[in-house]
Image: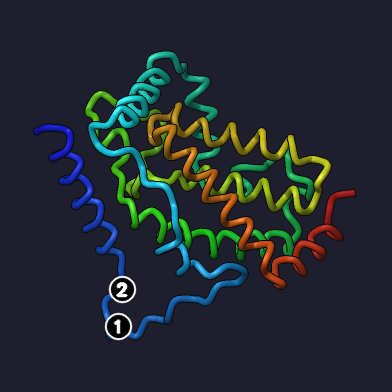
Amino acid sequence: MNFLKKQLVLTAALALGACAHTPPAGTGQAPVQQAYYVDAEQFRTVRFNQPPAPGSMQQEADIAAVLSWQNKRNEADCAKARRTSEETYDSFWSGKSPFAEPLPAAVKDFFERLASDLGKADKNMKERFRRPRPYMAYAEVRPCVKKPESFSYHSGHALYARVFACVLTDIVPERRAEFHAKSDEISRDRVIGGVHYPADITAGKAFADLYHEELLKSEAYRKDIKKMKALLAK
């Protein structure tokens, strides 16, 4: 099976998997929760760069980068990548958080609200492009972290990590460089782990910057940022 045909088959399979989780009509389930800060519906149609086309030079460069990391990574690299495998505040920022640990209840609730909105936006954008993961498209790719079943483009880890970094910078501006360096590290680990292409990471960061612009327009978000500043660790 040539690459293009394989890509189409994988995309169809992923799409069916995504649909399998959609609640059937008439089940009486609760309606989708409204956004806390940013409406996710806009990310179904907002202008955004396409992923590299199958068979293109960009696609070949993407898979070459994944295989290059696979050939030079060691168990310590993989263990490090596994430590941030969950897209949560605690997974990403434990030990570097500007708040007391464990997180105060109000801070935890804030990041849960943020993650709730992000999750919907993340899904809406991924389903527009439906790019299969590297290990789904290439048999020689051997991930050393948990294999996600969602689409590859954009990287959700890059999205979450960079949005969290931007949010933390809104709260503690003087630590911007530190927060963004950690975000970049988390994103790079997804390529090292074999579950994302570099183009996915670039797209995740671009999406995060776009998303943060929308966050700053939210009065509810701006009010919560003021509250978070008052809860910083002394």
Q: What residue type is labelled 2?
A: Pro
Viewer-proximal residue among 123 and 116: 123
Above or below 24: residue 54: above
* Crowd band around label 2 with a 10 angstrom C-alpha radius: few (<14), some (14–19), many (20+): few
Image quarter where the N terminus lies is top left
Compared across the picture, whether 45 is left or right of 218 comes to: left
Question: SS at mark 2?
Answer: loop
Position in image of residue 189 (x %, y %): 50, 31
Q: Where on the picture, by quarter, is residue 41?
A: bottom left
Return the residue at label 2: 23
Q: Where on the picture, by quarter, is residue 69?
A: top left
In the image, what residue occupies the spot 52% across and 20% down?
Answer: 76
Q: Which amino acid does label 1 sit on?
A: Thr
Question: SS at mark 1?
Answer: loop
Position in image of residue 220 (x %, y %): 70, 72
Count of labels in the image: 2
In the image, what residue occupies the spot 43% across and 46% down?
Answer: 154
Q: Which residue lies furthest to the left in this view?
A: 1
* Crowd band around label 1 with a 10 angstrom C-alpha radius: few (<14), some (14–19), many (20+): few
In the image, what residue occupies the spot 45% across and 44% down?
Answer: 155
In the image, what residue occupies the spot 77% across and 69% down?
Answer: 223
Colour pattern of the rendering? rainbow
Viewer-proximal residue among 31 and 208: 208
Q: Where on the picture, by quarter, is residue 71?
A: top left
Position in image of residue 169 (x %, y %): 75, 48
The CA distance from mark 1 to mark 2 is 7 Å
Q: Are marks 1 and 2 in contact (CB under 8 Å)?
A: yes
Position in image of residue 152 (x %, y %): 36, 44
Return the residue at label 1: 27
Q: Residue furthest right?
A: 234
Residue 192 image label = none
Above or below 209: residue 31: below
